[in-house]
Image (cartoon, rainbow, N blue to C red):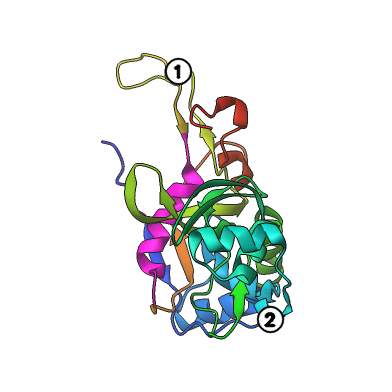
Amino acid sequence: MTPIRRLELFALPEFPMVRPGDDLASLIADGLARANQELRTGDVIVVAQKIVSKAEGRLLDLTTIEPTAEAQALAQEVGKDPRLIQAILSESIRVVRKRPNLLIMEHRLGFIMANAGVDHSNVGGGDRVLLLPADPDASAERLRNDLALRCGAAPAVVITDSFGRPWRRGSCGVAIGAAGLPALVDMRGLPDLFGRPLEVTLVGLGDEIAAAASLLQGQADEAQPAVLLRGLHWSAPDAPAAALVRPEQEDLFR
């Protein structure tokens, strides 16, 4: 008989508002204690990008920005604050698509996303915006190491953000940073149910974890940015979230 496999996900309760310089590992450990959970080897801690960016001080005050002529022209096209456009351009490689009130950008890390991840929401109002972590995979690795020191067990860590998707309506949680697990699993060569070898199957495990945790994290005022996932097993070698970005030579739509 095939054993029953079960995944459990817990949103850490009463998670505080994160401020620049906060120790995320300590905040997560406190949340685990409130949930009567102890961190185990093989657990996955899934954290929203916003709390990572806030702890790392990735807040930007738009009043300090002087827009370039390029930013002013683009701002007029799409109907956005020129200072915000300058912040977006500074985080980007190129404009993918534009129309009034919409900018799809290629982020400097290769992500294709609205506004290059520069965000006003859940920042506290005013003229401040939040940028993505400078290196989300490195952020995940640091948090993993800090949790190991704080809790005595090294979990895998996934950092999530909400992306829109081409040809699909609605946003969905995706992994932008990962450590301690294979964000991308190559299943090519493995047999299917009938013994036929898989030829093209790559599993975006990091994104699947992010989407599952996003059901608890929410998109608005849920205030549940940290999730514990338990019961997941993997055997593939570790791979960062950067492995999920499709290389330009494989992109049929660029």
Q: Regarding mark 2 in the picture, which secondary structure is present there?
A: helix
Q: Main secondary structure of the magenta part?
A: helix
Viewer-side label of 1, 2 = 2
Q: Quadrant of residue 40?
A: bottom right
Tell me the kind of residue under disc 1: Glu
x then y, percent, for residue 69: 70, 61
Counting from the top left corner in percent of width and height, residue 136 is at 65, 57
Residue placed most toward the observer, 151 or 158 = 158
Residue 63 makes an appearance in the image: yes
Name the image quarter holding the N terminus. top left
Answer above or below: position of 36 versus 43. Answer: below
Quadrant position of residue 41? bottom right
Q: Is residue 206 magenta?
A: yes
CB contact under 8 Å: marks 1 and 2? no
Q: Which span of residues is magenta-colored?
A: 203-220
Mark 1 and mark 2 lie on one chain; the one further toward the N terminus is 2
In reply to whether residue 42 is colored magenta, the answer given is no
Residue named by callout 1: 199
The residue sitting at the top extreme is 196
* Residue 61 versus residue 172 in the image, above or below: below
Q: Is residue 153 in view?
A: no
How many numbered callouts? 2
Instruction: Pick the residue in front: 154 or 251.
Output: 251
Location of residue 227 in the rendering, given as x and y in whole percent from the top left corner: 46, 67
Task: Answer left or right for 6 relative to 161.
Answer: left
- Give the residue drawn at x 71%, y 69%: 149
In the current view of this chain or complex, which residue is farthest to the left?
A: 1
- The crowd level at tag 2 (other Cα within 10 Å; few <14, some 14-19, many 20+) is few
Identify which residue is drawn at 72% across, 63% down.
68
The label on residue 63 is 2
Q: Position of residue 199 (x, y in %)?
A: 45, 18
Q: Rounded to the nearest whole Å, what is the CA distance between mark 1 and mark 2?
A: 52 Å
